[in-house]
Image (cartoon, rainbow, N blue to C red):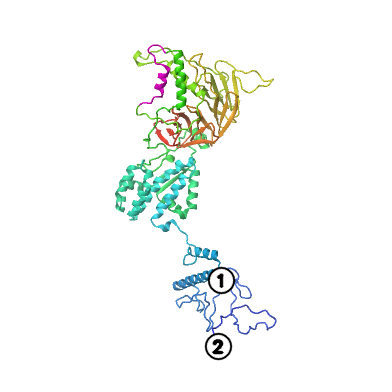
């Protein structure tokens, strides 16, 4: 009932029936209105709905205004004759949003009065990120309009560059098709200016390989030109094939889905619309996988279609079998000697010339040394500061002196005498009772030692002249005397390669020979071992390869060594580091042969089966600088 004139009417109280004993049951309290609420399905006996049950409409009461938290509009949908809307109209929704805004303002005013500054700042911050319905506003790449393609491309590019080195080569294949189809999408939808901006921002990273295509894209500005241009028509004629390893594909999809609002959904749309990702386990090109063994038994060759990339007729730039960027500048000259080392070598050679003057008409040792370190015109070599080496020792001086003497006494077969020269003797060795267990063999540079790696996981070293191989460690009273062979035990699987550290034989009997002091071995147990040829014991075990290590080679100056293996990777190690220093990724199958360039600045690797390429890698940058193709069978 309305109150007396001039007084503000009290808000009606909707309460449950009183349970007090002071009034008869069922009688309302004075000044209250007894609500008439029907019991609905899912409600309790006292008329209060259970959680999840539909709420009944507020019944009309003459002269009682609707609750302030319910908007009222004559256009609202009503039910059961109720003047209060169950479904608010658009105008009532705006009123409801205004009520929320006013409530926030009142709460902020209250917090300011009370001095709750932190709470007030937090409420303002959260309220600024709410939509009209009070829900948090979440930024999506799709809401950015044409900028979504640039945001998605940055997301993909940054993730690829921060990924593991072993996956980068495969993942970088995604960048070119995503770049092309993003540009096509922008131009097709008449966003010429945005398409040109996108092209200008990201084209530099493709300039070396796709210069011709980029020049063509610069001339395209209309949707009709997309349909008329031969290159864009080629890209739209069929889906772009991208072969990806199973693990790479899983990581890619997981990253894109978890970052869908940051641009991942855009990349997924482009991949689904224009690309065909061929997920492969790489079984057919892995000679030790189960699939490969079965296929070889049935004479089935690997499916070349599984390895094809791109669109027939379109240049991909980088494929599984070749790269076209074979124009990098190479430094093929000899590496410069240290100034102190060169001075010591020249002093020793000068002393040798004074003791044993050269024959008439022959150059002196100092002249030969100057010729050897002199660089030809136009041929540049790597500097000592580009590849750090430990300081030179007296042994290095001796080796350089012996190299010059060996060069002076070397047999020369020249064209002026018809290719006729002194006969060259050949020494051949036979290993008896090996029982087909020798996997590899290596001779030392001083021609005194030979080492073999066996299927039984051990290494045996012999002295070619039958001399005993002593040990610097003290022998026990019951130990046998030194023999002309030693056995090195440590690997747990077959040994596939051995390599002696650099050494050189004396030019004559009076010269001091620099015998090798270290031996490297690689095995199917995924490790490389460094052995001492003075203590005849293992010094270091290097781990890093994810499969058998097929080969190992010392660098031309020692200290660094090179390995390759079943995991399709080539790695450079330092003698004083337990982990690898460089890892080269690019081959699509086993890497089974490796070699050093004489100046130590480049390494070469050869792969078999589906790859059949020889690659040249830069030690200083880690990049592939040359790819040599042409083999049609195993390298």
Q: Which mark is residue 302?
A: none
Work out whether residue 102 can be spotted.
Answer: yes
Q: Which of 104 and 595 is in front in this view?
A: 104
Residue at left offset 54%, top offset 65%: 117
Give x and y (percent) for residue 614: 42, 32
| Magenta extent | 358-376
Quick check: marks 2 and 1 in contact, CB under 8 Å? no
Give the residue at mark 1.
Answer: 54
Residue at left offset 50%, top offset 70%: 105
Dot 1 alpha-carbon crowd within 10 angstroms: few under 14, some 14 to 19, many 20 or more: few
Q: Is residue 390 above or below residue 81?
A: above
Q: Which of 211 and 283 is in front in this view?
A: 211
Residue at left offset 65%, top offset 79%: 18
Mark 2 residue element? loop
Q: Distance between the residues labelled 2 and 1?
A: 37 Å
Give x and y (percent) for residue 338: 45, 27
Taking the view exactly as shown, the residue that stands out farthest to the bottom is: 5
Give the residue at mark 2.
Answer: 4
Would you identify the image quadrant in which residue 475 lies?
top right
């Amino acid at each position: 009932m309305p109150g007396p004139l001039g007084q503000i009417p009290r808000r009606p109280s909707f309460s449950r029936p009183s349970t007090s004993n002071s009034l008869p049951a069922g009688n309302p309290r004075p000044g209250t209105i007894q609500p008439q609420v029907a019991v609905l399905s899912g409600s309790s006996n006292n008329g209060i709905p259970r959680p999840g049950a539909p709420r009944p409409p507020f019944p009309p009461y003459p002269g009682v205004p609707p609750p302030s938290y319910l908007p009222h509009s004559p256009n609202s949908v009503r039910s059961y004759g109720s003047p209060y809307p169950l479904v608010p109209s658009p105008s009532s929704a705006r009123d409801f949003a205004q009520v929320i805004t006013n409530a926030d303002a009142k709460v902020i005013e209250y917090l300011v009065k009370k001095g709750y500054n932190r709470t007030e700042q937090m409420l303002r911050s959260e309220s600024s990120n709410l939509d009209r319905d009070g829900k948090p506003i979440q930024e999506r790449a799709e809401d950015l309009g044409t900028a979504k393609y640039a945001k998605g491309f940055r997301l993909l590019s940054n993730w690829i560059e921060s990924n593991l080195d072993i996956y980068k080569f495969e993942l970088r294949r995604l960048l070119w098709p995503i770049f092309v189809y993003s540009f096509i999408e922008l131009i097709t939808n008449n966003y010429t200016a945005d398409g040109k901006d996108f092209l200008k921002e990201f084209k530099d990273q493709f300039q070396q390989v796709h210069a011709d295509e980029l020049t063509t894209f610069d001339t395209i500005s209309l949707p009709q030109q997309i349909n008329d241009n031969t290159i864009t028509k080629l890209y739209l004629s069929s889906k772009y094939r991208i072969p990806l390893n199973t693990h790479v594909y899983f990581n890619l999809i997981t990253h894109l889905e978890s970052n869908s609002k940051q641009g991942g959904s855009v990349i997924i749309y482009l991949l689904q619309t224009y690309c065909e990702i061929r997920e492969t386990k790489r079984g057919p090109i892995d000679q030790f996988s189960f699939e490969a063994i079965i296929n070889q038994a049935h004479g089935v060759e690997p499916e070349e279609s599984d390895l094809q990339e791109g669109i027939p007729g379109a240049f991909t730039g980088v494929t599984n079998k070749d790269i076209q960027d074979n124009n990098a500048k190479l430094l093929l000259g000899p590496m410069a000697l240290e100034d102190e080392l060169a001075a010591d070598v020249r002093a020793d050679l000068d002393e040798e010339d004074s003791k044993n003057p050269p024959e008439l008409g022959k150059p002196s040792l100092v002249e030969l040394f100057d010729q050897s370190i002199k660089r030809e015109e136009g041929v540049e070599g790597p500097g000592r500061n580009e590849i750090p080496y430990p300081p030179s020792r007296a042994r290095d001086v001796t080796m350089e002196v012996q190299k010059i003497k060996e060069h002076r006494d070397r047999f020369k077969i020249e064209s002026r005498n018809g290719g006729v020269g002194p006969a060259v003797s050949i020494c051949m060795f036979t290993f008896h009772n090996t029982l087909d267990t020798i996997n590899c063999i290596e001779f030392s540079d001083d021609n005194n030692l030979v080492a073999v790696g066996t299927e039984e996981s051990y290494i045996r070293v012999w002295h070619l002249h039958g001399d005993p191989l002593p040990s610097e460690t003290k022998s026990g009273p019951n130990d046998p005397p030194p023999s002309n062979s030693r056995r090195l035990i440590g690997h747990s699987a077959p040994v596939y390669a051995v390599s002696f550290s650099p050494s050189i034989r004396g030019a004559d009997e009076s010269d001091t020979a620099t015998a090798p002091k270290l031996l490297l071995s690689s095995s199917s147990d995924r490790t490389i071992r460094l052995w001492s040829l003075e203590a005849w014991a293992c010094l270091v075990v290097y781990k890093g390869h994810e499969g058998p290590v097929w080969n190992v080679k010392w660098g031309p100056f020692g200290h660094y060594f090179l390995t390759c293996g079943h995991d399709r990777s080539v790695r450079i190690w330092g003698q004083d580091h337990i982990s690898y220093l460089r890892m080269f990724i690019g081959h699509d199958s086993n890497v089974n042969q490796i070699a050093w360039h004489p100046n130590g600045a480049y390494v070469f690797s050869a792969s078999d089966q589906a790859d059949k390429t020889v690659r040249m890698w830069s030690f200083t940058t880690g990049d592939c600088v040359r790819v040599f193709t042409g083999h049609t069978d195993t390298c």
